[in-house]
Amino acid sequence: MSTELILIAFGVILFTAIFYSYMRDAENSRQIRFLANTMDNFNKQMFALERKIEKIEIALASRQKTSNTDDIENKMEQELASMAEPIAFSLNDIQSSFSHFKVQMESRLEHVENGMKSVAMPKSLTGMDDQKIISLYKQGMDEETIAKELALSKAEVEFALKISKMQ
């Protein structure tokens, strides 16, 4: 009966870990889609900026050659600066999103690692004490005495004996 409870508990823990992993994966996918959309918007803005630059260059080429080149350069610089500002803001947003995402992932990874370290199997399942249990049982000791001797639970001793078919 205790073996069945251990297996059921282990199954519940495994199911919970899989469900948690699935939920985290869904959240990560949502954040990645958000970042992909942001990058797509960034590329659209870059394309629009390139088109505006081409139009300005065409307009400048068609103007009279007597125009002052300094005025033209100043207008181009102003136009480019006004177009580059939204792109700079988008880049800052992307950078902060990536930083936040990285911090979240590191925190989640650390949490999962700590959770996995805290899950421990009974000593008898590892085989460390199985030989000692079998030896003491063959010498005539009962399960309760063996459990006290090896600082194990009686259920672990019984489980080890059942696995080795001694009981």
Image (spheres, rainbow, N blue to C red):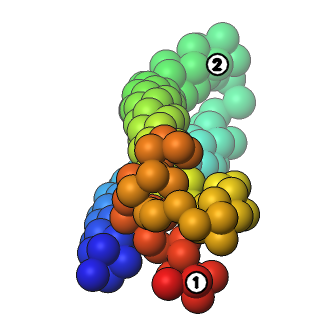
Residue positioned 64% across, 19% down in the render:
73
Q: What residue occupies the far front of the structure in this picture? A: 140
Ranked by sequence position, the earlier of labels 2 and 1 is: 2
Q: Is 68 rendered above or below residue 161?
A: above
**Figure quadrant of residue 59:** top right
Residue positioned 58% across, 66% down in the render:
140
How far, Cα to Cα, is label 2 from label 1? 94 Å
Residue under label 1: 166
Amino acid on which the number 2 mark rests in the picture: Glu
Can see residue 110? yes
Residue positioned 55% across, 45% down in the render:
150
Amino acid on which the number 1 mark rests in the picture: Met
Residue under label 2: 73
Q: Is 21 rendered above or below residue 15?
A: above
Mark seen at residue 114: none
**Figure quadrant of residue 137:** bottom right
Report the side of 59 relative to 78 (left or right).
right
Rendered location of residue 125, percent (x, y): 57, 65
